Amino acid sequence: MNVNLSNIRQEYVVDNAGHRTAVILPVEDYEELLADIHDLAVIAERREEPTITLEELKDQLKNEGLL
């Protein structure tokens, strides 16, 4: 995750009663937040998958000619 929420410049849109109804973020920060959300979704989807050691991964990549 790349975005530190305390460093994001943000502005709020408020209604007539002063209640926050929306937030305005710099596009770069918004895109980083979307990327982080996507990464977290992928992690959640794959958390039950079996794991392999680094050596097993290296062996697989060598066998496939990728390393």
Image (tube, helix red, strand yellow):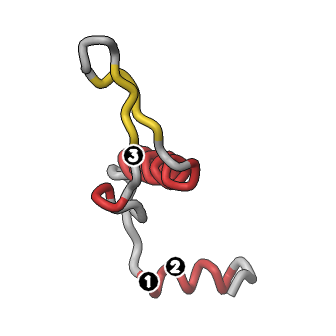
Quadrant in the picture for residue 51: bottom left
Residues at badges 3 and 1 in contact (C-beta under 8 Å)?
Answer: no
Between 16 and 48, the residue placed more toward the observer is 16
In this figure, which residue is indicated by the disc labeled 2?
A: 57
Verify CB contact (< 8 Å) between mark 2 and mark 3: no
Q: Which amino acid does label 3 sit on?
A: Gln
The quarter holding residue 6 reads: bottom left
Three-letter amino acid code of the residue under disc 2: Leu
Q: Position of residue 29 (x, y in %)?
A: 49, 53
Contact, mark 2 vs mark 1 (Cβ under 8 Å): yes
Helix, strand or loop at disc 1?
helix
Q: Name the residue under label 3.
A: 10
Mark number displayed over residue 54: 1
Q: How far apart are marks 2 and 1 (CA)?
A: 5 Å
Q: How many marks?
A: 3
Local SS, label 2: helix
Q: Position of residue 44 (x, y in %)?
A: 36, 46
Q: Compare marks 3 and 1 and give the one earlier in the sequence.
A: 3
Query: As drawn, is 25 to the left or to the right of 28?
Result: left
Q: In this view, does 14 lie above or below 43?
A: above
**Nearest the camera: 66 or 5?**
5
Considering depth in this image, is 46 or 64 the residue closer to the camera?
Answer: 46
Which amino acid type is shown beneath numbered disc 1? Leu
The residue under the point 43% across, 46% down is 37
Position of 55 with respect to 20 (left or right) is right
Q: In this view of the protein, which residue sits in the foreground, 5 or 38?
A: 5
* N-term mark: 2 or 3: 3
In the image, residue 30 above or below residue 67: above
How far apart marks 2 and 3 lie (CA) works out to 42 Å
Q: Is residue 4 shown left or right of residue 64?
A: left
- Disc 3 element: loop
